[in-house]
Image (tube, grey):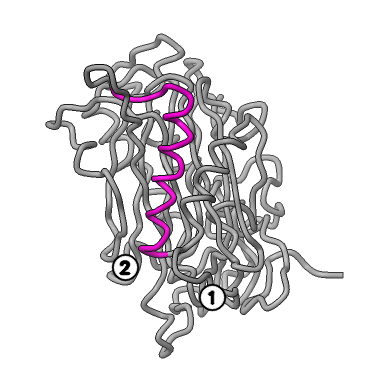
């Protein structure tokens, strides 16, 4: 029977650590998944408005097979600087793809739009994301904060603040899969105008409130809740994520895993993958379990990728905390 890992976090996948860095006055931040050893990686983009770095090299037909880290950042296009900071930190550690006497850390990245969220974006000539990326790598550990932290610091959905979420699953064959996601969706993670999560059928141990599905189901549940509809901010969103496993996968199999994890977006967000979202999933395979999988086992792995991602999305919204100048309420009831 599938069950969450001991941390219920992406760091239950052996060989991965996560670091966050954030500025609450800015209402933005960076999260970095650091691979202890280079990991096989791929990506799948299904949103219509992505912002990325080094994603072409992740295609199965391209040469570089592994990466050193993955960066998720706020800041829209400015946030792509975070990968430079993360790369600098990894270079100090002697990490990277060997080219002669040099080592070049391979650090793909994706960004979400959090520039219009009540934070102070008057940062002067250069944005702070390079330094935040550097700090996030330095902070990488097995334990890390969720909710209003890292790339989820300034995230919002249509109904509540978004945030950084994580979850993990151990399959019956002993393989572990985990997800990390910054939830900044155009749509909503909750049903109608209530607090029940679309992800409820997959919830483990009341990890995001234990409310289950509403009964009776709201008649307006299918009505669209769109973030700031009619406002210019409606066009600026994106949910970005990493799905990871300790199974031994080829680059093509990692690509298929990223595709499967997008089903978790569809299970957890209504709507998802819109022209105004840059919805994206990176995948990582550390291979630390030493286990290869059959085609039949891959079906289970893909399903677990989707359910684990759906849980992580709900946890990101559930864990968000209130800060001054927030534009939206948090999911948790405030006392």
Up/down of 111 relative to 165, above or below: below
- Res. 83 in view: yes
Q: Residue 202, percent across and down?
A: 55, 45
**Which is in the foreground here, disc 2 or disc 1?**
1
Disc 2: which residue: 274
Up/down of 334 relative to 9, above or below: below
Which residue is drawn at the image coordinates 43% and 47% (left, top)?
Answer: 241
**Between discs 2 and 1, the one toward the N terminus:** 1
Up/down of 235 relative to 140, above or below: below
Q: Which mark is residue 110?
A: none
Q: Which residues are magenta?
A: 76-97
Q: Quadrant of residue 140?
A: top right
Mark 2 touching mark 1, by CB under 8 A? no
Q: Quadrant of the N terminus?
A: top right
Q: Quadrant of residue 125?
A: bottom left
Work out which residue is located at the far bottom of the displayed protein and give it.
230
Disc 1: which residue: 122
| Left or right: residue 97 compared with residue 156 | left
Inspect the magenta stretch and tell me whether residue 72 lies in it.
no
Q: Residue 325, percent across and down?
A: 68, 78
In front: 202, or 261? Answer: 261
């Amino acid at each position: 029977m599938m069950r969450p890992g001991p941390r219920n976090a992406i760091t239950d996948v052996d060989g991965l650590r996560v670091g966050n860095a954030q500025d609450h006055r800015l209402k933005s931040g960076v999260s970095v998944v650091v691979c202890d050893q280079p990991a096989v990686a791929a990506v799948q983009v299904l949103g219509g408005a992505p912002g990325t770095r080094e994603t072409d090299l992740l295609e199965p037909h391209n040469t570089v097979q592994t990466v050193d880290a993955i960066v998720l950042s706020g800041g829209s296009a400015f946030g792509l600087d975070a990968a430079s900071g993360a790369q600098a930190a990894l270079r100090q550690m002697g990490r990277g793809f060997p080219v002669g006497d040099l080592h070049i850390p391979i650090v793909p990245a994706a960004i979400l739009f959090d520039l219009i969220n009540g934070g102070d974006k008057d940062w002067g000539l250069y944005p702070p994301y390079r330094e935040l990326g550097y700090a996030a790598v330095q902070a990488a550990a097995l334990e890390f904060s969720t909710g209003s932290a890292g790339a989820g610091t300034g995230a919002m959905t249509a109904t509540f603040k978004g945030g950084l979420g994580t979850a993990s699953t151990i399959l019956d064959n002993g393989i572990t899969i985990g997800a990390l996601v910054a939830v900044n969706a155009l749509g909503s993670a909750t049903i109608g105008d209530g607090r029940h999560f679309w992800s409820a059928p997959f919830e483990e141990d009341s990890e995001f409130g234990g409310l289950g599905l509403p009964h009776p189901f709201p008649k307006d549940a299918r009505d669209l809740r769109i973030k700031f509809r009619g406002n210019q901010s409606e066009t600026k969103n994106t949910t970005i994520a990493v799905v990871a496993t300790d199974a031994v996968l080829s680059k093509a199999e990692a690509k298929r895993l990223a595709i499967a994890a997008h089903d978790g977006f569809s299970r957890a967000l209504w709507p998802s993958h819109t022209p105004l979202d840059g919805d994206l999933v990176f995948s990582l395979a550390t291979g630390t379990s030493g286990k290869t999988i059959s085609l039949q086992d891959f079906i289970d792995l893909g399903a677990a990728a989707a359910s684990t991602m759906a849980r992580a999305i709900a946890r990101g919204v559930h864990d968000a905390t209130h800060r001054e100048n927030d534009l939206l309420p948090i999911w948790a009831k405030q006392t």
